[in-house]
Amino acid sequence: MNAINELFIYITKLLDNILFFDLLFGQVTGTKVPFVIALLIFGGVYLTLKFSFINLKMFSHSYKIIMGKYKTKDDVGLIEPRQSLTTALSATVGLGNIAGVALAVSIGGAGATFWMIIAGFLGMTLKFTEVTLSLKYRDILSDGTIIGGGMAYLRKGFANRGYTKTGKNLALLFAIFLLGGAIGGGNTFQVSQALGSVSNEIGFFKTYPWVFGVVVAILTGAVIIGGIKRIGTVTEKIVPLMVLVYVSASLWILIVNIDRLPHAFYLIFTEAFNPTAVTGGLIGVIIVGFQRAMFSSEAGLGSAPIAHSTAKVKYPVRQGMVALYEPFIDTVIICTMTALVIVTTGVCDPNAGFCGLIDAKNGAGLTAEAFRSVIYWFPMILSFSIFMFAFSTLISWSYYGEVAWIYLFGSSSVMVYKIIFLLFIVIATIVDTNTMVDFASILFLAMAIPNVIGLIVMSSEVKKDLNDYLYKLRKGELDRELMR
Protein backbone atom coordinates (compact mmCIF):
# COMPACT_ATOMS: atom_id res chain seq x y z
CA MET A 1 0.00 0.00 0.00
CA ASN A 2 2.79 2.45 0.92
CA ALA A 3 4.60 1.63 -2.31
CA ILE A 4 1.47 2.42 -4.35
CA ASN A 5 1.01 5.71 -2.48
CA GLU A 6 4.63 6.71 -3.08
CA LEU A 7 4.29 5.94 -6.79
CA PHE A 8 1.19 8.15 -7.12
CA ILE A 9 2.89 10.95 -5.16
CA TYR A 10 5.91 10.81 -7.48
CA ILE A 11 3.77 10.88 -10.64
CA THR A 12 1.67 13.74 -9.26
CA LYS A 13 4.71 15.91 -8.46
CA LEU A 14 6.28 15.20 -11.83
CA LEU A 15 3.13 16.19 -13.76
CA ASP A 16 2.61 19.24 -11.58
CA ASN A 17 6.09 20.56 -12.34
CA ILE A 18 5.73 19.96 -16.08
CA LEU A 19 2.14 20.97 -16.80
CA PHE A 20 1.28 23.46 -14.08
CA PHE A 21 4.28 25.72 -14.00
CA ASP A 22 3.76 29.06 -12.27
CA LEU A 23 3.33 31.97 -14.68
CA LEU A 24 4.62 34.23 -11.91
CA PHE A 25 7.76 32.04 -11.65
CA GLY A 26 7.57 32.13 -7.86
CA GLN A 27 8.14 35.88 -7.75
CA VAL A 28 5.05 36.47 -5.58
CA THR A 29 5.20 34.69 -2.24
CA GLY A 30 2.24 32.43 -1.54
CA THR A 31 0.71 32.91 -5.00
CA LYS A 32 0.85 30.51 -7.91
CA VAL A 33 -0.87 31.03 -11.26
CA PRO A 34 -0.84 27.65 -13.04
CA PHE A 35 -0.53 28.00 -16.81
CA VAL A 36 -3.53 25.74 -17.45
CA ILE A 37 -5.89 27.80 -15.25
CA ALA A 38 -4.78 31.04 -16.92
CA LEU A 39 -5.35 29.40 -20.32
CA LEU A 40 -8.89 28.32 -19.35
CA ILE A 41 -9.77 31.81 -18.09
CA PHE A 42 -8.39 33.46 -21.22
CA GLY A 43 -10.18 30.98 -23.49
CA GLY A 44 -13.51 31.45 -21.72
CA VAL A 45 -13.35 35.24 -21.87
CA TYR A 46 -12.11 35.31 -25.47
CA LEU A 47 -14.80 32.95 -26.82
CA THR A 48 -17.62 34.56 -24.83
CA LEU A 49 -16.79 37.94 -26.35
CA LYS A 50 -16.24 36.49 -29.83
CA PHE A 51 -19.64 34.75 -29.83
CA SER A 52 -21.39 37.82 -28.38
CA PHE A 53 -22.46 36.15 -25.12
CA ILE A 54 -24.14 33.15 -26.72
CA ASN A 55 -24.15 31.58 -23.26
CA LEU A 56 -26.99 33.97 -22.39
CA LYS A 57 -28.63 34.75 -25.75
CA MET A 58 -29.54 31.20 -26.83
CA PHE A 59 -30.74 29.85 -23.49
CA SER A 60 -34.40 29.62 -24.54
CA HIS A 61 -33.68 28.08 -27.93
CA SER A 62 -31.37 25.52 -26.31
CA TYR A 63 -34.20 24.42 -24.02
CA LYS A 64 -36.49 23.82 -27.02
CA ILE A 65 -33.83 21.59 -28.59
CA ILE A 66 -33.47 19.59 -25.37
CA MET A 67 -37.23 19.12 -25.24
CA GLY A 68 -37.10 17.53 -28.71
CA LYS A 69 -38.63 20.26 -30.87
CA TYR A 70 -35.94 20.46 -33.55
CA LYS A 71 -35.85 16.90 -34.90
CA THR A 72 -35.37 16.35 -38.62
CA LYS A 73 -35.20 13.35 -40.95
CA ASP A 74 -31.56 14.26 -41.64
CA ASP A 75 -30.40 13.78 -38.03
CA VAL A 76 -27.35 11.51 -37.75
CA GLY A 77 -26.11 9.81 -34.58
CA LEU A 78 -26.77 7.09 -32.01
CA ILE A 79 -28.72 8.69 -29.17
CA GLU A 80 -31.05 11.65 -28.66
CA PRO A 81 -29.57 15.08 -27.82
CA ARG A 82 -31.18 14.88 -24.38
CA GLN A 83 -29.51 11.51 -23.70
CA SER A 84 -26.16 12.92 -24.76
CA LEU A 85 -26.71 15.78 -22.35
CA THR A 86 -27.59 13.48 -19.43
CA THR A 87 -24.64 11.21 -20.24
CA ALA A 88 -22.32 14.22 -20.16
CA LEU A 89 -24.03 15.55 -17.02
CA SER A 90 -23.60 12.18 -15.32
CA ALA A 91 -19.86 12.68 -15.72
CA THR A 92 -19.89 16.31 -14.55
CA VAL A 93 -22.65 16.39 -11.93
CA GLY A 94 -20.86 14.32 -9.36
CA LEU A 95 -18.41 14.53 -6.53
CA GLY A 96 -16.92 17.71 -7.96
CA ASN A 97 -20.18 19.37 -6.91
CA ILE A 98 -20.16 17.78 -3.47
CA ALA A 99 -16.53 17.20 -2.54
CA GLY A 100 -14.87 19.72 -4.85
CA VAL A 101 -16.99 22.66 -3.74
CA ALA A 102 -16.41 21.86 -0.08
CA LEU A 103 -12.68 21.82 -0.74
CA ALA A 104 -12.88 25.11 -2.64
CA VAL A 105 -14.71 26.87 0.19
CA SER A 106 -12.48 25.36 2.88
CA ILE A 107 -9.32 26.41 1.01
CA GLY A 108 -10.40 29.66 -0.65
CA GLY A 109 -13.15 30.82 1.68
CA ALA A 110 -16.68 31.89 0.71
CA GLY A 111 -15.31 34.15 -2.02
CA ALA A 112 -14.29 31.11 -4.07
CA THR A 113 -18.03 30.60 -4.73
CA PHE A 114 -18.27 33.88 -6.67
CA TRP A 115 -15.43 32.88 -8.96
CA MET A 116 -16.93 29.42 -9.43
CA ILE A 117 -20.11 31.09 -10.71
CA ILE A 118 -18.14 33.31 -13.09
CA ALA A 119 -16.25 30.24 -14.27
CA GLY A 120 -19.59 28.50 -14.84
CA PHE A 121 -20.84 31.24 -17.17
CA LEU A 122 -17.57 31.34 -19.10
CA GLY A 123 -17.60 27.54 -19.16
CA MET A 124 -20.93 27.59 -21.00
CA THR A 125 -19.22 29.19 -24.00
CA LEU A 126 -16.25 26.85 -23.81
CA LYS A 127 -18.64 23.89 -23.77
CA PHE A 128 -20.63 25.26 -26.73
CA THR A 129 -17.47 25.64 -28.79
CA GLU A 130 -15.93 22.25 -28.10
CA VAL A 131 -19.20 20.33 -28.55
CA THR A 132 -19.93 22.10 -31.86
CA LEU A 133 -16.48 21.15 -33.13
CA SER A 134 -16.89 17.60 -31.86
CA LEU A 135 -20.08 17.09 -33.88
CA LYS A 136 -18.58 18.77 -36.93
CA TYR A 137 -15.46 16.59 -37.04
CA ARG A 138 -16.69 13.33 -35.52
CA ASP A 139 -15.60 10.04 -37.11
CA ILE A 140 -18.17 7.32 -37.77
CA LEU A 141 -16.32 4.01 -38.05
CA SER A 142 -17.41 1.03 -40.15
CA ASP A 143 -18.69 -0.83 -37.07
CA GLY A 144 -20.90 2.13 -36.11
CA THR A 145 -18.58 3.45 -33.40
CA ILE A 146 -18.53 7.24 -33.22
CA ILE A 147 -15.32 8.96 -32.15
CA GLY A 148 -15.60 12.64 -31.34
CA GLY A 149 -14.06 15.00 -28.87
CA GLY A 150 -10.62 16.55 -28.95
CA MET A 151 -8.92 13.75 -30.88
CA ALA A 152 -11.16 14.27 -33.90
CA TYR A 153 -11.38 18.05 -34.13
CA LEU A 154 -7.75 18.72 -33.25
CA ARG A 155 -6.54 16.33 -35.93
CA LYS A 156 -8.98 17.32 -38.68
CA GLY A 157 -9.34 20.99 -37.84
CA PHE A 158 -5.60 21.68 -37.90
CA ALA A 159 -5.20 19.55 -41.05
CA ASN A 160 -7.76 21.79 -42.80
CA ARG A 161 -5.47 24.71 -42.04
CA GLY A 162 -2.39 22.96 -43.39
CA TYR A 163 -0.99 22.02 -39.98
CA THR A 164 -1.48 18.26 -40.24
CA LYS A 165 1.48 17.25 -38.08
CA THR A 166 0.64 19.78 -35.36
CA GLY A 167 -2.95 18.57 -35.28
CA LYS A 168 -1.90 14.93 -34.99
CA ASN A 169 0.51 15.72 -32.15
CA LEU A 170 -2.10 17.74 -30.24
CA ALA A 171 -4.68 14.97 -30.74
CA LEU A 172 -2.21 12.37 -29.51
CA LEU A 173 -1.36 14.45 -26.46
CA PHE A 174 -5.04 15.00 -25.74
CA ALA A 175 -5.82 11.27 -26.03
CA ILE A 176 -3.04 10.42 -23.56
CA PHE A 177 -4.29 13.03 -21.07
CA LEU A 178 -7.88 11.85 -21.59
CA LEU A 179 -6.95 8.26 -20.83
CA GLY A 180 -5.15 9.43 -17.70
CA GLY A 181 -8.10 11.64 -16.76
CA ALA A 182 -10.47 8.69 -17.08
CA ILE A 183 -8.32 6.64 -14.71
CA GLY A 184 -7.64 9.56 -12.35
CA GLY A 185 -10.49 12.05 -12.02
CA GLY A 186 -13.16 9.92 -13.67
CA ASN A 187 -12.35 6.82 -11.66
CA THR A 188 -10.03 6.85 -8.66
CA PHE A 189 -11.09 10.26 -7.33
CA GLN A 190 -14.76 9.34 -7.53
CA VAL A 191 -14.25 6.01 -5.77
CA SER A 192 -11.99 7.37 -3.02
CA GLN A 193 -14.37 10.23 -2.20
CA ALA A 194 -17.41 7.94 -2.28
CA LEU A 195 -15.63 5.49 0.01
CA GLY A 196 -14.83 8.30 2.47
CA SER A 197 -18.52 9.19 2.71
CA VAL A 198 -20.03 5.69 2.68
CA SER A 199 -17.55 4.29 5.21
CA ASN A 200 -18.63 6.97 7.70
CA GLU A 201 -22.11 5.43 7.64
CA ILE A 202 -21.15 1.79 7.10
CA GLY A 203 -18.21 0.96 9.35
CA PHE A 204 -17.52 -2.35 7.60
CA PHE A 205 -15.99 -0.50 4.66
CA LYS A 206 -13.52 1.30 6.94
CA THR A 207 -12.10 -2.07 7.92
CA TYR A 208 -12.38 -3.66 4.48
CA PRO A 209 -12.27 -0.80 1.94
CA TRP A 210 -11.27 -3.15 -0.88
CA VAL A 211 -14.68 -4.83 -0.63
CA PHE A 212 -16.29 -1.51 -1.53
CA GLY A 213 -14.01 -1.34 -4.57
CA VAL A 214 -14.94 -4.84 -5.69
CA VAL A 215 -18.68 -4.12 -5.38
CA VAL A 216 -18.38 -0.87 -7.37
CA ALA A 217 -16.23 -2.57 -10.00
CA ILE A 218 -18.83 -5.32 -10.51
CA LEU A 219 -21.69 -2.81 -10.84
CA THR A 220 -19.70 -0.61 -13.20
CA GLY A 221 -18.65 -3.56 -15.33
CA ALA A 222 -22.26 -4.66 -15.71
CA VAL A 223 -23.07 -1.31 -17.36
CA ILE A 224 -19.99 -0.41 -19.38
CA ILE A 225 -19.80 -3.73 -21.20
CA GLY A 226 -23.01 -2.67 -22.99
CA GLY A 227 -21.44 0.41 -24.57
CA ILE A 228 -22.71 3.97 -25.05
CA LYS A 229 -26.35 3.03 -25.71
CA ARG A 230 -26.69 1.27 -22.36
CA ILE A 231 -24.76 4.06 -20.63
CA GLY A 232 -27.12 6.64 -22.18
CA THR A 233 -30.18 4.66 -21.06
CA VAL A 234 -28.92 4.32 -17.48
CA THR A 235 -27.81 7.95 -17.09
CA GLU A 236 -31.07 9.28 -18.53
CA LYS A 237 -32.87 7.61 -15.61
CA ILE A 238 -30.55 8.21 -12.66
CA VAL A 239 -29.17 11.72 -13.31
CA PRO A 240 -32.49 13.61 -12.93
CA LEU A 241 -33.29 11.61 -9.77
CA MET A 242 -29.88 12.31 -8.23
CA VAL A 243 -30.13 16.01 -8.95
CA LEU A 244 -33.68 16.17 -7.56
CA VAL A 245 -32.75 14.48 -4.26
CA TYR A 246 -29.61 16.58 -3.75
CA VAL A 247 -31.14 19.90 -4.74
CA SER A 248 -34.26 19.28 -2.63
CA ALA A 249 -32.18 18.58 0.48
CA SER A 250 -29.99 21.60 -0.20
CA LEU A 251 -33.05 23.84 -0.57
CA TRP A 252 -34.42 22.55 2.73
CA ILE A 253 -31.18 23.39 4.54
CA LEU A 254 -31.14 26.87 3.00
CA ILE A 255 -34.76 27.40 4.06
CA VAL A 256 -33.94 26.32 7.62
CA ASN A 257 -30.94 28.66 7.60
CA ILE A 258 -32.68 31.43 5.67
CA ASP A 259 -31.72 33.98 8.32
CA ARG A 260 -28.06 33.24 7.55
CA LEU A 261 -28.41 33.58 3.78
CA PRO A 262 -27.93 37.38 3.60
CA HIS A 263 -24.67 37.08 5.54
CA ALA A 264 -23.60 34.15 3.33
CA PHE A 265 -24.13 36.20 0.16
CA TYR A 266 -22.31 39.09 1.82
CA LEU A 267 -19.31 36.85 2.52
CA ILE A 268 -19.35 35.40 -1.00
CA PHE A 269 -19.23 38.82 -2.67
CA THR A 270 -16.91 40.60 -0.24
CA GLU A 271 -14.39 37.78 0.16
CA ALA A 272 -14.31 37.32 -3.64
CA PHE A 273 -12.36 40.59 -3.80
CA ASN A 274 -10.97 40.74 -0.28
CA PRO A 275 -10.29 37.11 0.67
CA THR A 276 -9.15 36.15 4.15
CA ALA A 277 -8.98 32.35 3.96
CA VAL A 278 -6.60 31.73 1.08
CA THR A 279 -2.91 32.29 0.62
CA GLY A 280 -2.24 34.55 -2.34
CA GLY A 281 -5.08 37.03 -1.81
CA LEU A 282 -7.29 37.92 -4.77
CA ILE A 283 -5.31 35.92 -7.32
CA GLY A 284 -5.31 32.93 -4.99
CA VAL A 285 -9.09 32.86 -4.52
CA ILE A 286 -9.70 33.30 -8.26
CA ILE A 287 -7.43 30.34 -8.99
CA VAL A 288 -9.17 28.17 -6.38
CA GLY A 289 -12.63 29.08 -7.68
CA PHE A 290 -11.82 28.48 -11.33
CA GLN A 291 -9.87 25.30 -10.68
CA ARG A 292 -12.72 23.67 -8.76
CA ALA A 293 -15.37 24.92 -11.21
CA MET A 294 -13.50 23.54 -14.20
CA PHE A 295 -12.86 20.29 -12.34
CA SER A 296 -16.58 20.01 -11.73
CA SER A 297 -18.06 21.13 -15.08
CA GLU A 298 -15.14 19.94 -17.26
CA ALA A 299 -15.75 22.96 -19.53
CA GLY A 300 -12.78 23.46 -21.82
CA LEU A 301 -11.30 20.05 -21.07
CA GLY A 302 -12.68 18.37 -24.20
CA SER A 303 -14.15 15.36 -22.38
CA ALA A 304 -17.91 15.99 -22.53
CA PRO A 305 -17.85 16.52 -26.33
CA ILE A 306 -17.16 12.79 -26.60
CA ALA A 307 -20.59 12.01 -25.13
CA HIS A 308 -22.24 14.72 -27.22
CA SER A 309 -20.61 13.46 -30.41
CA THR A 310 -23.04 10.53 -30.50
CA ALA A 311 -26.11 12.80 -30.57
CA LYS A 312 -28.65 12.61 -33.42
CA VAL A 313 -28.58 16.11 -34.90
CA LYS A 314 -28.33 17.76 -38.30
CA TYR A 315 -26.39 20.85 -37.30
CA PRO A 316 -23.31 20.61 -35.03
CA VAL A 317 -24.13 24.05 -33.62
CA ARG A 318 -27.46 22.69 -32.39
CA GLN A 319 -25.84 20.19 -30.05
CA GLY A 320 -23.40 22.88 -28.98
CA MET A 321 -26.39 24.87 -27.77
CA VAL A 322 -27.68 21.85 -25.85
CA ALA A 323 -24.30 21.68 -24.12
CA LEU A 324 -24.73 25.24 -22.82
CA TYR A 325 -26.90 23.80 -20.07
CA GLU A 326 -24.15 21.59 -18.65
CA PRO A 327 -22.04 24.21 -16.83
CA PHE A 328 -25.21 26.11 -15.92
CA ILE A 329 -26.77 23.12 -14.17
CA ASP A 330 -23.52 21.77 -12.81
CA THR A 331 -21.74 24.91 -11.64
CA VAL A 332 -24.10 27.88 -11.54
CA ILE A 333 -26.91 25.94 -9.82
CA ILE A 334 -25.62 22.84 -8.02
CA CYS A 335 -22.14 24.06 -7.05
CA THR A 336 -23.59 27.33 -5.79
CA MET A 337 -26.17 25.50 -3.68
CA THR A 338 -23.49 23.27 -2.17
CA ALA A 339 -21.37 26.31 -1.37
CA LEU A 340 -24.31 28.06 0.30
CA VAL A 341 -24.96 24.95 2.40
CA ILE A 342 -21.29 24.86 3.45
CA VAL A 343 -21.19 28.57 4.28
CA THR A 344 -24.54 28.79 6.12
CA THR A 345 -23.87 25.72 8.28
CA GLY A 346 -20.38 26.95 9.18
CA VAL A 347 -18.62 23.57 8.95
CA CYS A 348 -15.49 25.20 7.51
CA ASP A 349 -15.07 27.34 10.61
CA PRO A 350 -11.96 26.14 12.50
CA ASN A 351 -14.07 26.09 15.67
CA ALA A 352 -16.51 23.61 14.10
CA GLY A 353 -14.11 20.72 14.72
CA PHE A 354 -13.79 19.41 11.16
CA CYS A 355 -10.26 20.56 10.41
CA GLY A 356 -9.23 16.92 10.10
CA LEU A 357 -11.58 16.47 7.15
CA ILE A 358 -10.23 19.64 5.54
CA ASP A 359 -6.59 18.61 6.03
CA ALA A 360 -7.34 15.17 4.57
CA LYS A 361 -9.12 16.80 1.60
CA ASN A 362 -12.22 14.74 2.39
CA GLY A 363 -14.65 17.16 0.77
CA ALA A 364 -17.45 14.60 0.61
CA GLY A 365 -17.20 14.01 4.36
CA LEU A 366 -17.23 17.77 5.01
CA THR A 367 -20.39 18.22 2.94
CA ALA A 368 -21.99 15.29 4.76
CA GLU A 369 -21.33 17.01 8.09
CA ALA A 370 -22.94 20.19 6.75
CA PHE A 371 -26.10 18.24 5.92
CA ARG A 372 -25.97 16.37 9.23
CA SER A 373 -26.01 19.65 11.14
CA VAL A 374 -29.55 20.34 9.86
CA ILE A 375 -30.92 16.94 8.80
CA TYR A 376 -29.34 14.50 11.23
CA TRP A 377 -30.51 11.43 9.32
CA PHE A 378 -29.67 12.74 5.84
CA PRO A 379 -25.98 11.73 5.70
CA MET A 380 -27.11 8.15 5.13
CA ILE A 381 -29.15 9.27 2.13
CA LEU A 382 -26.35 11.61 1.09
CA SER A 383 -23.91 8.71 1.20
CA PHE A 384 -26.17 6.81 -1.16
CA SER A 385 -26.46 9.91 -3.36
CA ILE A 386 -22.68 10.32 -3.35
CA PHE A 387 -22.35 6.67 -4.32
CA MET A 388 -24.79 7.18 -7.21
CA PHE A 389 -23.03 10.39 -8.27
CA ALA A 390 -19.73 8.52 -8.29
CA PHE A 391 -21.25 5.54 -10.10
CA SER A 392 -22.78 7.66 -12.87
CA THR A 393 -19.48 9.51 -13.30
CA LEU A 394 -17.60 6.23 -13.46
CA ILE A 395 -19.70 4.79 -16.25
CA SER A 396 -19.56 7.96 -18.33
CA TRP A 397 -15.82 8.41 -17.89
CA SER A 398 -15.25 4.76 -18.69
CA TYR A 399 -16.64 5.58 -22.14
CA TYR A 400 -14.44 8.66 -22.50
CA GLY A 401 -11.39 6.59 -21.66
CA GLU A 402 -12.56 3.88 -24.05
CA VAL A 403 -12.67 6.35 -26.94
CA ALA A 404 -9.14 7.51 -26.07
CA TRP A 405 -7.97 3.89 -25.93
CA ILE A 406 -9.51 3.13 -29.35
CA TYR A 407 -7.80 6.20 -30.80
CA LEU A 408 -4.43 5.15 -29.38
CA PHE A 409 -4.54 1.36 -29.69
CA GLY A 410 -7.52 0.41 -31.85
CA SER A 411 -10.85 -1.19 -31.02
CA SER A 412 -9.63 -4.81 -31.01
CA SER A 413 -8.05 -4.44 -27.54
CA VAL A 414 -10.79 -2.36 -25.92
CA MET A 415 -11.60 -5.14 -23.42
CA VAL A 416 -8.09 -4.76 -22.00
CA TYR A 417 -8.88 -1.12 -21.25
CA LYS A 418 -12.15 -2.02 -19.52
CA ILE A 419 -10.37 -4.52 -17.28
CA ILE A 420 -7.71 -1.92 -16.39
CA PHE A 421 -10.42 0.64 -15.64
CA LEU A 422 -12.21 -1.79 -13.31
CA LEU A 423 -8.96 -2.73 -11.55
CA PHE A 424 -8.27 0.92 -10.76
CA ILE A 425 -11.62 1.11 -9.00
CA VAL A 426 -10.26 -1.38 -6.45
CA ILE A 427 -6.85 0.36 -6.32
CA ALA A 428 -8.57 3.64 -5.43
CA THR A 429 -9.86 2.12 -2.18
CA ILE A 430 -6.35 1.43 -0.85
CA VAL A 431 -4.59 4.65 -1.93
CA ASP A 432 -4.55 7.74 0.30
CA THR A 433 -7.44 10.13 -0.42
CA ASN A 434 -5.19 13.19 -0.22
CA THR A 435 -2.97 11.76 -2.93
CA MET A 436 -5.96 10.92 -5.12
CA VAL A 437 -7.31 14.49 -5.03
CA ASP A 438 -4.00 15.93 -6.26
CA PHE A 439 -3.45 13.18 -8.84
CA ALA A 440 -6.97 13.49 -10.27
CA SER A 441 -6.92 17.29 -10.46
CA ILE A 442 -3.72 17.33 -12.49
CA LEU A 443 -4.80 14.66 -14.97
CA PHE A 444 -8.19 16.32 -15.43
CA LEU A 445 -6.94 19.82 -16.08
CA ALA A 446 -4.04 18.72 -18.28
CA MET A 447 -6.50 18.00 -21.11
CA ALA A 448 -7.28 21.72 -21.31
CA ILE A 449 -3.84 22.59 -22.70
CA PRO A 450 -4.18 21.05 -26.19
CA ASN A 451 -7.97 21.48 -26.16
CA VAL A 452 -8.24 25.21 -25.46
CA ILE A 453 -5.48 25.95 -27.96
CA GLY A 454 -7.58 24.13 -30.55
CA LEU A 455 -10.78 25.95 -29.57
CA ILE A 456 -9.16 29.34 -30.01
CA VAL A 457 -7.56 28.41 -33.36
CA MET A 458 -10.85 27.04 -34.76
CA SER A 459 -13.18 29.61 -33.21
CA SER A 460 -13.62 31.53 -36.49
CA GLU A 461 -15.22 28.56 -38.24
CA VAL A 462 -17.53 28.01 -35.27
CA LYS A 463 -18.49 31.68 -35.51
CA LYS A 464 -19.33 31.22 -39.21
CA ASP A 465 -21.43 28.09 -38.53
CA LEU A 466 -23.22 29.89 -35.71
CA ASN A 467 -24.05 32.88 -37.90
CA ASP A 468 -25.40 30.57 -40.63
CA TYR A 469 -27.58 28.75 -38.10
CA LEU A 470 -28.93 31.97 -36.59
CA TYR A 471 -29.74 33.28 -40.08
CA LYS A 472 -31.81 30.15 -40.83
CA LEU A 473 -33.49 30.42 -37.44
CA ARG A 474 -34.52 34.05 -38.07
CA LYS A 475 -35.80 33.20 -41.57
CA GLY A 476 -37.90 30.30 -40.23
CA GLU A 477 -36.02 27.71 -42.29
CA LEU A 478 -35.29 25.54 -39.24
CA ASP A 479 -38.98 25.31 -38.36
CA ARG A 480 -39.81 24.17 -41.90
CA GLU A 481 -37.31 21.30 -41.55
CA LEU A 482 -39.04 19.79 -38.53
CA MET A 483 -40.50 16.28 -38.73
CA ARG A 484 -44.28 16.59 -38.79
Image: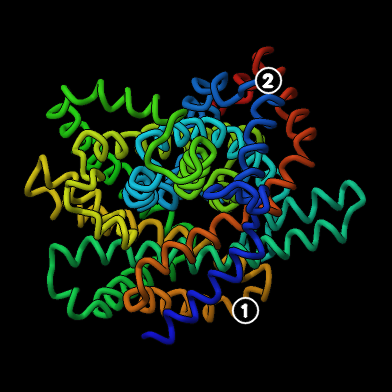
For this view, does 26 lie left or right of residue 186? right
Quadrant containing the N terminus is bottom left
269 sits left or right of 166 in the view: left
Image spot of residue 452 (x, y percent): 68, 46
The one of 406 and 107 positioned closer to us in this rendering: 107
* Residue at point 19%, 67% (across, down): 199
Q: Quadrant of residue 433?
A: bottom left
Is 384 situated above or below 343?
below
Mark 1: secondary structure = helix
Determine whether, in the image, residue 430 is placed left or right of residue 446: left
Viewer-closest of 92 and 265? 265
Q: Which mark identifies residue 140?
A: none
The kind of residue on which mark 1 rests is: Ser
Query: Which of the two labelled residues, at mark 2 and mark 1, occupies the earlier sequence position?
Result: 1
Residue picked out by circle 1: 412
Are dots 2 and 1 in contact, CB under 8 Å?
no
Q: Measuring from the top left, give residue 474's x and y in whole percent.
A: 66, 13
**As drawn, is 116 to the left or to the right of 74?**
left
Would residue 343 be visible to someone looking at this image? yes
The residue beneath circle 2 is 470
Residue 32 percent across, percent down from the top left: 57, 50
Query: In this view of the protein, can residue 149 be seen by the observer?
Result: no
